[in-house]
Image: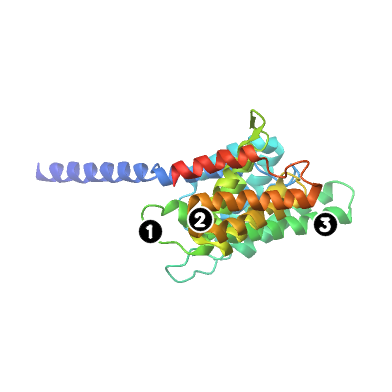
Amino acid sequence: MFQNIQNNQEQSEQNYSRKIQIKNLFKINDIILYAIAFLISMVGIDEELAPFGLAIFAAACSNRIPVGILYIFILIGTFIGFGIGGVLNFLLTSLLLVVMMLIFRPRIQEEGRNEVQKLGIYLAIVTFIVQASKMFFSIFLVYDLVVSIMLAIITYIFYKIFSNSLIVITKYGIKKAFSIEEVMGASLLIAIALCAFSKLHIYGLSITNIFSIMIVLFLGWKNGMLVGGTAGITIGMVLGIINSAEPILVASYAISGMIAGILNKLGKLGVIIGFCVGNAILTYVANGNTVPIITIREILIASLRTISNS
């Protein structure tokens, strides 16, 4: 009888432990991570190359984050953004990455590092192999070879960025302070995810631009000129590459973010004025103040949201 009681207690403890583990997969931080992974997997370069879903999957593996549910969200986002072909490409590349990890054990770094497992080289190799293998089923072009190499390099770069920025999402509210690199990487991650809404406009206003401006304003207000300018450069460059925008957009975000950071001593109002001044200067230099590079309505809405949320 006592044996049965003990077995029932052990089974109850196992069921309770299993419930806790399942509950831990749906914390607020994890849900936000799933949403970002879903959005980021819908984004590509020239609507053909999709390095971001692979990069965030490998970054999660590197950080030893449970990737089961994350993998499903990436698959769904890839299907929406790139169809069956994109899903097959992601499945083949990710499975090949897992096989390579099992055969060649990745190097483990000391505890406390964001990138616990060094997976960058593995990811670049499998990305190149899968992309280059398409050349064997069509006419060989040097262009396709160059694209395969560039895709492997881009995927590796964003893997490094994401592997050092996921901690901001997973440990937000738990860890008290983050490094500048982590904050910048997380901002870039969110900016890329927002590009999933690049075709969504409300009353002629771009949702992507509004939230991107909010990120630059917030970082310039909190960290000053260097971070504001750097955030403007990186976010402007991402928007320019992904959305095929004009190069002047990068300069506008960079100058506006830098001036906003310079005026951060004046508080939120100073940051907003600085961003508007930077945009006005670039608009006047670029086209004589005839067509605004970043519309004033988007800046004002982002400014209002920044004031109310900060």
The tag earlier along the polypeptide, 1 or 2, is 1
| Amino acid at dot 2 | Trp
Cβ atoms under marks 3 and 2 closer than 8 Å: no
On residue 106, the disc is none
Residue found farthest to the top: 203
SS state under label 2 = helix
Q: Position of residue 125 (x, y in %)?
A: 69, 61
Residue found farthest to the bottom: 110
Residue tagged 2: 221
Depicted 196 relative to depicted 254: above or below: above
Q: Position of residue 148 (x, y in %)?
A: 77, 55
Please give the name of the residue rendered at 64% of the width and 34% of the height, measured from the top-left corner: 205
| Amino acid at dot 1 | Lys
Q: Residues within 10 Å of mark 3 (few under 14, many from 20)?
A: some
What quarter of the picture does the N terminus occupy?
top left
The tag earlier along the polypeptide, 1 or 3, is 3
Question: Which sits in the foreground, 54 or 11?
Answer: 54
SS state under label 3 = helix
Q: Could you give the CA–CA distance between mark 1 and mark 2, rounded to whole angstroms?
A: 21 Å
Q: Residues within 10 Å of mark 2 (few under 14, many from 20)?
A: many
Residue tagged 3: 145
The tally of labels here is 3
Q: Is residue 76 left or right of residue 146?
A: left
Please give the name of the residue rendered at 76% of the width and 41% of the height, measured from the top-left corner: 291
Q: Is residue 77 left or right of residue 291?
A: left
Residue 42 visible in the shown view: no
Question: Which sits in the foreground, 282 or 197?
Answer: 282
On residue 175, the disc is 1
Which is in the foreground here, disc 1 or disc 2? 2
Q: Could you give the CA–CA distance between mark 3 and mark 2, rounded to whole angstroms?
A: 44 Å
Q: Could you give the CA–CA distance between mark 1 and mark 3, rounded to whole angstroms?
A: 43 Å
